[in-house]
Amino acid sequence: MGLGGCIILIAVGAILTFATDWDMQGVNLDLVGIIFMIVGLIGVATFSSIAKRRRVLVPPSTPVVDDRHHRDGYGGM
């Protein structure tokens, strides 16, 4: 699940918790919404920590200068 999926989970959870007043027998939609928001937040934290590890900076390598002259067969060096 990517970052977008996590944000969608948070949004759906917030809608279920704060914007609905549905009553379903045997299901507490407020609790389901809170669970969705928690899972979405855990997903965002996991995604951001993985993304930080992917962006490891590699120091640039020093250029190699070859001072030896090569003859090309046409009298040049």
Image: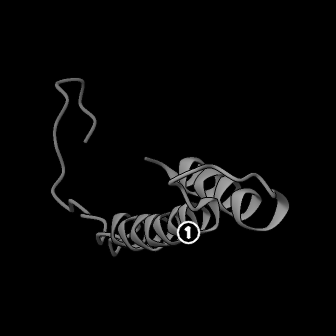
Q: Quadrant of residue 50?
A: bottom left
Which secondary structure lies at badge 1? Answer: helix
Residue with the most extreme front position: 25
Residue 39, percent from left and from top: 46, 65
Q: Is residue 56 above or below residue 13?
A: below
Q: Is residue 52 above or below residue 72?
A: below
Q: Quadrant of residue 46?
A: bottom left
Seen at 20% across and 59% down, the residue is 66
Residue 38, percent from left and from top: 51, 72
Seen at 23% across and 31% down, the residue is 75
| Residue under numbered circle 1 | 31
Seen at 50% across and 67% down, the residue is 35
Residue 24, percent from left and from top: 63, 49
Residue 54, percent from left and from top: 35, 63
How many numbered discs, if any? 1
Viewport quadrant of the C terminus:
top left
Q: Quadrant of residue 63?
A: bottom left
Query: With 31 as the anchor, is 73 left or right in this view?
Result: left
Inspect the image, locate mark 1, and give the three-letter code of the amino acid beneath it.
Leu
Seen at 48% across and 49% down, the residue is 2
Label 1 Cα crowd, 10 Å radius (few <14 / some 14-19 / many 20+): few
Query: With 58 as the anchor, is 47 left or right in this view?
Result: right
Query: With 30 as the anchor, is 40 left or right in this view?
Result: left
